[in-house]
Amino acid sequence: MTTKITNVIKVSLAHLGEEELEEVRSAFEYGYFGLAYNVDEFETQVGKYIGAKHVVATNTGTSALHVAIDVLGLQPGDEVIVPSLTFVASFQAITAVGAIPVPCDVDTDTLCMDPKDVEKRITSKTKVLMPIHYGGYPCDMSALIDLKEKHELRIIEDAAHAFGSTYRGEMIGSFGDITCFSFGSQKNITCGEGGAIVSNDEEFDNLCRQKRLLGMERKSHSSSSWKERSWMYDVPVQGYRYHMSNINAGIGLAQLKKIDSFLTRRREMCEKYDSALKNIPGIRFRKVDYSTIGPHIYVIRILNNRRDDLKRFLMERDIETGVSFIPNHFHSFYNNENVSLPETEQAFKEIISLPLHCGLSDANIDDIIECVTEFFNS
Ligand SMILES: Cc1ncc(COP(=O)(O)O)c(C=O)c1O
């Protein structure tokens, strides 16, 4: 029961059904929409799915990143190395604590953070590396973990795109330092809006819990008896109103039950695009093995300055496409004339995302492939 907003084939869309509606109805009937039972359950189920000890659910992926950076105690002037080719949310979370995002380049084949370029940018002020698992494909974590250890840094993985992805057989979120997910409306699973901070560190987890709820320190909100619930609390730290709501967590729980079929379908669509388009010389493909990841977007590169023409051509045929992302060093707030990121800047001229969501039928994918092929034949 996915509602189509228009006749346009959307580049991305949540796939929702009666199960999600039922969860919303039941949270509605409960009458308390804040931090309640569904949030606890969502955290437990996400932890089980990933194989991680600690999960803190937040209201967005951006707030998950912000809290994670804040809990690490970054000070104004501390540096975080982050690919420029990411959604501005990653950058905003860094500058929200006064830290400095140091944009780095991406690997030409995967469009993920390039560890060689990262190493060149490490200074005495560098505190954190923030890899972005672009489109769901994991960065070269082995090389980044080596850098983390060599230079005594922390890693916050921005895994907004990578819920359900694996790296060398291990789930993203299960082996890293700190991992942040997004459950926004177009992600691999959605809560409507939502995010999560995942770690295996109890002390870090406790601080994240405190900060996502206005810095309040009190007994569990989910005590089995209202009479036992402590009404006393202290506020020992700066915090934020960032907790996930009971309604959003309910939607997430229904979605989590469908994750296997969602990811299977997303992989199928990516592989179908790859094999149908692979002989078109004007397209460059990412070197991505879709079978091991939860693909969030399907990105190809259009050569010879034809990306915008293809985008227009497809839109005229009611096919929406995306460009993920405008490099952040191009934005006025983050502009730095001394930054040169050749791979990122070249990629930005070429990348286009074709529609990828579970509401697409095989016939839709065939139509899209046919239109892309027609463009290159014309
Ligand atoms: C790479 C990346 N990081 C972070 C976010 C932020 O997530 P949210 O929209 O849930 O705040 C997004 C959202 O699309 C994203 O693409």
Image (cartoon, rainbow, N blue to C red):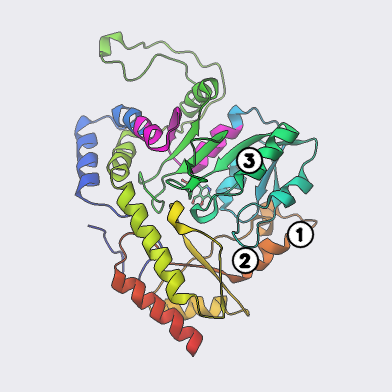
Which residue matches tag 2?
Answer: 348
Residue 164 vs 3, above or below: the answer is above
Towards the viewer: 80 or 150: 150
Q: Bounds of the magenta span?
A: 43-69
Q: Is residue 368 magenta?
A: no
Q: Which residue ends up furthest to the bottom in the rendered image?
A: 378
Residue 131, position as x, y percentages in the image: 61, 46
Question: What amino acid is at disc 1?
Answer: Ser
10 Å crowding of disc 1: few (<14), some (14-19), many (20+): few
Which residue matches tag 3?
Answer: 94
Q: Residue at x 56, y 64 (%)?
A: 286
Q: Marks 3/1: CA distance?
A: 20 Å
Mark 3 or mark 1: whose residue is earlier in sequence: 3
Residue 7, position as x, y percentages in the image: 30, 72
Quarter holding residue 247: top left
> Can you see residue 76?
no
Q: Which residue ends up furthest to the front in the rendered image?
A: 169
Please report contact status of discs 2 and 3: CB closer than 8 Å, yes or no.
no
Report the mark closest to the observer, 2 or 3.
2
Q: Is residue 49 magenta?
A: yes
Mark 2 or mark 3: whose residue is earlier in sequence: 3
